Image (cartoon, helix red, strand yellow):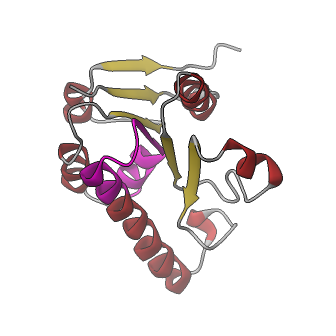
Amino acid sequence: MGRIHIYTGKGHGKSLAALGEAAMAAARGKHVVIIQFLKGNGLEESQYQRRLEPEIKVFRFEKSDCDFMKLPEEKKREEIQNMKNGLNFAKKVLNTGECDLLILDEVLGLVDNGIVAEQDLKSVLEARGDDTDVILTGISMSEEMCALADTVSSIECRK
């Protein structure tokens, strides 16, 4: 069965740890899909990103490059719909078995900010096939999310 791993905590490096997992999976011939949320520009379209394909594909559904919390209400509503579309895309990717590893970067922040309900995220995870691993990142998580995970890595800033 595919495993669920969570990188959480207030320290820096959660996304980088997930990207390291993506690189290792790709080196083993696996296909990886990364969907970024709440990342501003994130891994914006670049020559480097295109060189990662076809093993690693990166998606970002938000249109704004600004911090979500600083957007006017109308733009926030627009971006919320974009992020929900990204979550629906994640569910489709899992249903179709398009990848061996799905990384939902900063998806726990969607729950923290009330953008999606925790149950919506659980519904996405339930769509995964037997062999698909999923990595979730975010600053905090609930006990329920922790219980769903096979492994949780807490990243803290010590200095």
Dividing the image into 4 quarters, which one contains the C terminus?
top right
Residue 22: horizontal and vertical position, in percent? 55, 31
Foreground residue among 28 and 34: 28
Query: Looking at this rendering, what residue extends furthest in the bottom direction?
Result: 74
Question: Which residue: 17% across, 44% down?
Answer: 126
* Apparent side of residue 115 relative to residue 46 in the rendered image (left or right): left
Residue 151: horizontal and vertical position, in percent? 33, 18
Query: Looking at this rendering, what residue extends furthest in the right direction?
Result: 47
Foreground residue among 62 and 10: 62
Residue 102, placed above or below residue 92: above
Residue 88: horizontal and vertical position, in percent? 32, 64
Dividing the image into 4 quarters, which one contains the N terminus?
top left
The magenta region covers: 90-113
Question: Which residue: 27% across, 20% down?
Answer: 150
Indicate whether residue 101 is drawn in magenta: yes
* Apparent side of residue 69 relative to residue 49 in the rendered image (left or right): left
Quarter-wise, where is residue 67 in the image? bottom right
Question: Which residue: 45% across, 80% down?
Answer: 77
Foreground residue among 72 and 21: 21
Residue 43, placed above or below residue 72: above
Question: Which residue: 53% across, 21% down?
Answer: 28
* Apparent side of residue 125 relative to residue 15 in the rendered image (left or right): left
Residue 113: horizontal and vertical position, in percent? 41, 56
**Mark count:** 0
Indicate whether residue 25 is drawn in magenta: no
* Apparent side of residue 80 relative to residue 47 in the rendered image (left or right): left
Residue 75, placed above or below residue 83: below
